Image: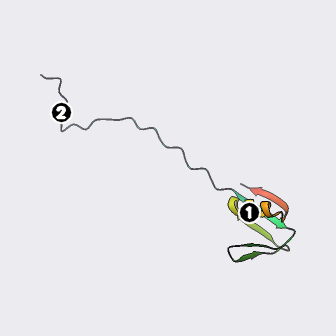
Amino acid sequence: MTDAPNAATPEVVAVEPAAAPAAPLYYDVKLNARFNWLDFNYLPRDHHIVDKTIYDAMDAAGVVADVKQLS
């Protein structure tokens, strides 16, 4: 008998499961001024459900009057 591995036998490799991707963050935002993002107008009289990218842009523009993070 030899110590050489058999070419027909696949090698077993332990694989750890990958972590699930983080869920996207959404915000319920009320504005104090009009905000435009990619030719879409967000009006101050409405509540808007936006993702983190748009919320960060609104916050940088200083138009966020009230915000609630949704989970």
Rendered location of residue 33, percent (x, y): 85, 71
Question: Dot 1, how many residues are within 10 Å of its Cα: few (below 14), some (14-19), or many (20+)?
Answer: some
Q: Give the image location of residue 16, x and y in percent.
A: 45, 38
**Residue drawn 64% across the image and 56% down it:** 24
Observer-side mark, 1 or 2, equals 1
Depicted 10 relative to depicted 39: above or below: above
Element carrying mark 1: helix
Outermost residue on the front side: it is: 61
The residue at 82%/59% (across/down) is: 67
Q: Which residue is mark 1?
A: 57
The quadrant in which the C terminus is found is bottom right
Q: Position of residue 5 (x, y in %)?
A: 19, 30
The quarter holding residue 49 reads bottom right
Judge by depth and name the residue closer to the eye, 30 or 14: 30
**Mark 2 secondary-structure assignment:** loop
Residue at 70% across / 58% down in the picture? 52
Q: Which quadrant, please, contains the N terminus?
A: top left
Q: Amino acid at mark 2?
A: Asn
Residue type marked 1: Ala
User: In terms of image quadrants, where is residue 65?
Assistant: bottom right
Mark 1–mark 2 distance (CA, rounded to whole Å): 59 Å
Mark before the other along the chain sequence, 1 or 2: 2
Residue 42 position by quadrant: bottom right
Q: How many marks?
A: 2
Seen in the image, is 29 located left or right of residue 52?
Answer: right
| Circle on res. 6 | 2
Q: Residue furthest left?
A: 1
Seen at 76% across and 56% down, the residue is: 69
